[in-house]
Image (spheres, helix red, strand yellow):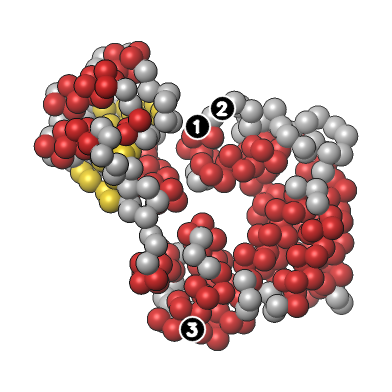
Amino acid sequence: MLGLVPPSIPPLLLIQGDEELLVARAVREALDAARAVDPELEVVDRAAGEFTDSDVVDLGASSLFGGLRAVVIRAAQELTDELRDALIAYIAHPMDDVMLVVVHNGAVRNRKIVDAMKAAGARAVAVPKISRPRERHDFVVAEVRRAGGRIADAAAAALLDAVGSDLRELAAVCEQLVADTDGPLDEAAVHRFHRGRAEASGFAVADAAIGGDLGSALTLLRQALESGTAAVLISSAVTGGLRDLARVAGAGGGSKFDLARALGMPDWKVEKAQRSARAWSDDGLARALRAAAAADAGVKGGAADPAYALETLVHTVVESRGRSGRTAAGAGAR
């Protein structure tokens, strides 16, 4: 153990690979673990091109407030030669109150940083691109287990056929299925909720509606319902998109990485909500959320025609976008 850094928190953590979802998750989990040890954790998170000479100086200086610090350097392969050498010098003699997290995509450029981290005994997390069918199958099994469920091999294959290869969609679908299904997930459960591209269709409806494209949203809604997508999943996708928008809009300014840490959301989802928030006001968002709550109750048995409840929701969401009132977008601006 190095000084203030407890055994459970590595003073040096190397995250190597270019699978964006898994990189973001690995960084978030490392920060969450450090924050569990020190709730007042001081975090410096630098995206590609943001790490500077002054950050190097701060990295090697004692904290003014005491306690544990975390410094995240993303896209380390893009550092200049000068910054690379300065970082390597630090890695050889790390501070005893800092957890340094270095993200490198595995490229040849700045490989010396990776070598230095490994030589210094850094804890390494590999997050290579998931591209082979077997790797995607294993990812689905792991995601279901992560959500507290179990899934049969045939069901995992059916889920991949229904949703496709996008890891973000797969992760969201796995979480939703575990939440909505009692017991192990079998092929019947997957087909019941995800014929066609079930959850992906739900997300597509949500994106179009929140983006203000009424024609596309209604067309996608009809296609989703005709392909067998459960109405509750479409409603859930729209409600989830609006809630993400509200959370990001209400969190105040900051970079996507700052907000991702504060809200416990993936940075890609924060960035997506930031872009959408520019066209939304507080009043419009509140109206859309009320409509989503009504639609959710409707598709769960409160409405005679769930399809009509969803069409009403889509119309209301599109009409609410840009509704007069204080703009929600300043929230989310960097």
Number of the label disc, if any, that sits on residue 331: none
Please tell me whether mark 3 sits on a helix, a strand or a loop: loop
Q: Residue at x 78, y 43 (%)?
A: 285
Q: Which residue is mark 1?
A: 258
- Residue on which disc 3 sits: 186
Task: Give how far apart the Cα atoms at labels 2 and 3 are.
Answer: 43 Å
> Residue 247: in sight, yes or no?
no
Q: Position of residue 62 (x, y in %)?
A: 26, 16
From the image, tell me which residue sits under label 2.
Answer: 254
Q: Amino acid at mark 1?
A: Asp
What residue do we see at 11% from left, 37% from top?
Answer: 119
Residue 180, relative to residue 334: is it above or below? below
Amino acid on which the number 2 mark rests in the picture: Gly
Task: Find residue 208 and report its horizontal and vertical position in percent.
Answer: 74, 54
Q: Are marks 2 and 3 in contact (CB under 8 Å)?
A: no
Q: Amino acid at mark 3?
A: Asp
- Alpha-carbon distance for marks 3 and 1? 39 Å
Left or right: 42 in relation to 276: left
Q: Position of residue 287 (x, y in %)?
A: 83, 47
Residue in the image at 49% along x and 73% along y: 160
Few, some or many residues within 10 Å of mark 1 (<14, 14–19, 20+): some
**Left or right of 320, for residue 271:** left
Sequence-first disc among 3 and 1: 3
Q: Earlier in the sequence, mark 2 or mark 3?
A: 3
Q: Could you say which quadrant of the image residue 295 lies in?
A: bottom right
User: Quarter of the image containing the C terminus?
Assistant: top right
